[in-house]
Image (cartoon, grey):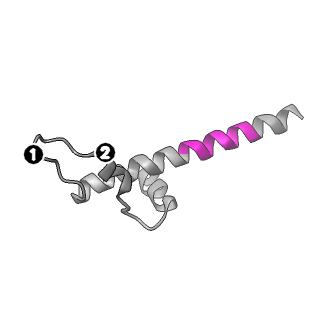
Amino acid sequence: MLRNLALVVLLAAVLYLCHVVARVENERYALVLGLCKPNAVGIIEVECLKAAETRTSSFWHVFYAISGS
């Protein structure tokens, strides 16, 4: 029983970390592509980074983040 609980907790942690990695990789790639330009002060808007969609799914963000491509 305790082993199953530990497995579920670890699986939840891995899924959460994959979600975070996908979000960060999406923002990084949006900056690389130049989708979000700095304003007159030189600051990039956070809303632009959050709204940018650079790849077709989160799976590809995780794949490219892990592979280092």
Question: Left or right: 28 with respect to 15?
Answer: left
Other-residue count near label 2 (Cα within 10 Å), few / some / many at <14 / 14–19 / ≥20:
few
Which residue is more in the foreground, 19 or 3? 19
Which residue is more in the foreground, 38 or 55? 38
Q: Residue furthest bottom?
A: 56
Q: Residue furthest left?
A: 40
Q: Is residue 41 magenta?
A: no
Which residue is more in the foreground, 28 or 63? 28
Q: Residue furthest top?
A: 2
Magenta stretch: dominant SS? helix
Please state the horizontal and vertical placement of residue 42, each as a whole percent of the image: 13, 42
Tag 2 secondary structure: helix
Residue beneath disc 2: 46
Please state the horizontal and vertical placement of residue 49, each as a whole percent of the image: 32, 51
Q: Residue at x 54, y 47 (%)?
A: 18
Q: Which mark is residue 56?
A: none
Quadrant of the rendering where the N terminus is positioned: top right
Residue type at the position of mark 1: Ala
Q: Residue at x 18, y 53 (%)?
A: 37
Q: Which mark is residue 40?
A: 1
Mark earlier in primary sequence (2, 1):
1
Residue type at the position of mark 2: Val
Q: Which residues are magenta?
A: 8-17
